[in-house]
Amino acid sequence: MRLTPFNVWARWMKRRLPTSLWGRSLLIIIIPVLIMQGAVTFVFFDAHWQKVTSRLSEGLAGDVAWAAESYQDDPTPENLAIIMDRAQRNMQLSIAFQEARTLPEESSRGALGVVDRTLEAALKSRLDQPFWYDTTRYPAYVDIRVQEPDGVLRIIAPRERAVATQAHIFVLWLMIATALLLAVAVIFIRNQVRSIERLAAAAEAFGRGEAVPRFKPNGAREVRAAAQAFLDMRERIQRHIDQRTAMLASVSHDLRTPLTRLRLELALAPPFKRAESMRQDMDEMEHMIDEYLAFARGEAGEPTQSVNIRNILEKAAEDARRAGAEVEVIAPDDLSIALRPMAFRRALNNLAGNAASHGEKVRLSARDLPSGGVEIIIEDDGPGIPDDMHEEAFRPFSRLDPSRSQNRKGVGLGMAIARDVARGHGGDITLGRSDLGGLKASIRLPAGKE
């Protein structure tokens, strides 16, 4: 796709927009409210405040022009006194004549300049004489001066005669109403998002095999419906797991009973040439039954608890040493994480045993992840597995090339069981090339809750 300026801008915006439902919900509420407030404020100032201010300024400019023209018609003290009296009584204007004075040279204007521009335009349209004005020196008044031949006519007018002074109250009430509206909307959206977050947390915990007994549907009708559907699904899955566990226990008993009888008959039988071979076959059959049942059972019903990673690595190292490998353990003494101990020990023993059976040196290490959680690495110096066959190694009953896949006592379920356990804890297993020259299996587990 050819990049256009619009596409570049869209990608830039997408990278900076919030990704959470909470953040996007806030934007959906805040942006329209701010646009509406800006539009209302603009319309108010353009259609009301400026228009009213313009009318007021024109009225004040007309009164100032009347005073200046009346004085020009009869520039005597008697006429000035009459003008001052009438302006005070009827127009709220305070007029004084400054004899032999000129207009000030300096000028002071307001920060926005809207009032100044409006008043200046009104005075220019009504006065022929030079004038000067100040809207900032006195907070409640406007100072206007008109140049006369023999001096300056100074006029002090109330500020409300030139500008609509109550506009800020409207804007203040508008801001207060907007803040209240946003507060109510934020509280409402937060409650709805919290319901979705609880549902997501419950689903994630159930995926790790953890129980969430206090979870109950709440929030909007659609969210409650989704939560109820999740609870129904969890019940059906749990019922299926319980039925499967009971069936596997029965199958295990039924399979082991004839196997035990065969062992007993073999032990009581007179020595013969094939006895040792038959005993090895029964050992292999028992190991195969254990692997089948472990793969099908998955230890899903086991509760989670905090486990010290170094301790569990040491136990796996002992089993690997019994297989004849030289094992090194590298892990902090205080590194712990919540997991299902029996299931995870089985997965770790499978990986460590697999490494010990194909290499002479095995290294078990663990470390904290910057994003939270733990990474456990099992390495060996064996022949390894080609990169394009890493995923094939995790398939149940999969056997790879002869250099690594001659699972003399198994049926190709060790790696599948290990990945199933890791994913059941919310993590995963990846394969790579070890620094020792062989295979490296990395288990990444998120920080779970006890």
Image: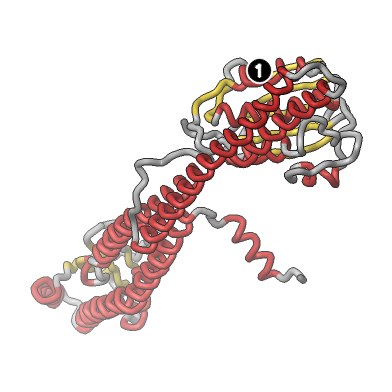
SS type, badge 1: helix
The answer to whether residue 152 is left or right of residue 249 is: left
What residue would you read off at disc 1? 315
Between residue 142 and residue 36, name the one nearer to us.
36
- Colour theme: secondary structure
Q: Position of residue 268 (x, y in %)?
A: 71, 17
Residue at (39, 50) in percent of width and height = 194
Q: Is residue 136 visible?
A: no
Residue at (48, 43) in percent of width and height = 242
Between residue 96 and residue 173, name the one nearer to us.
173
Q: Is residue 299 visible?
A: yes
The answer to whether residue 167 is left or right of residue 275 is: left
Residue at (57, 33) in percent of width and height = 253
Residue ranking furthest to the front:
270
227, above or below 152, in the image? above
The answer to whether residue 298 is left or right of residue 88 is: right
Task: Answer with the quarter of the image where residue 259 lies.
Answer: top right
Residue at (49, 27) in percent of width and height = 305
Task: Answer with the quarter of the image where residue 61 lies.
Answer: bottom left
- How many other residues sit within 10 Å of disc 1, few (<14), some (14-19) or many (≥20)? few
Q: Position of residue 103 (x, y in %)?
A: 35, 65
286, above or below 151, in the image? above
Question: Where is the N terminus found, in terms of image quarters?
Answer: bottom right
149, above or below 282, in the image? below
Between residue 182 and residue 303, name the one nearer to us.
303
Q: Amino acid at mark 1?
A: Lys
Between residue 253 and residue 327, name the one nearer to us.
253
336, above or below 124, in the image? above
The answer to whether residue 386 is left or right of residue 236 is: right
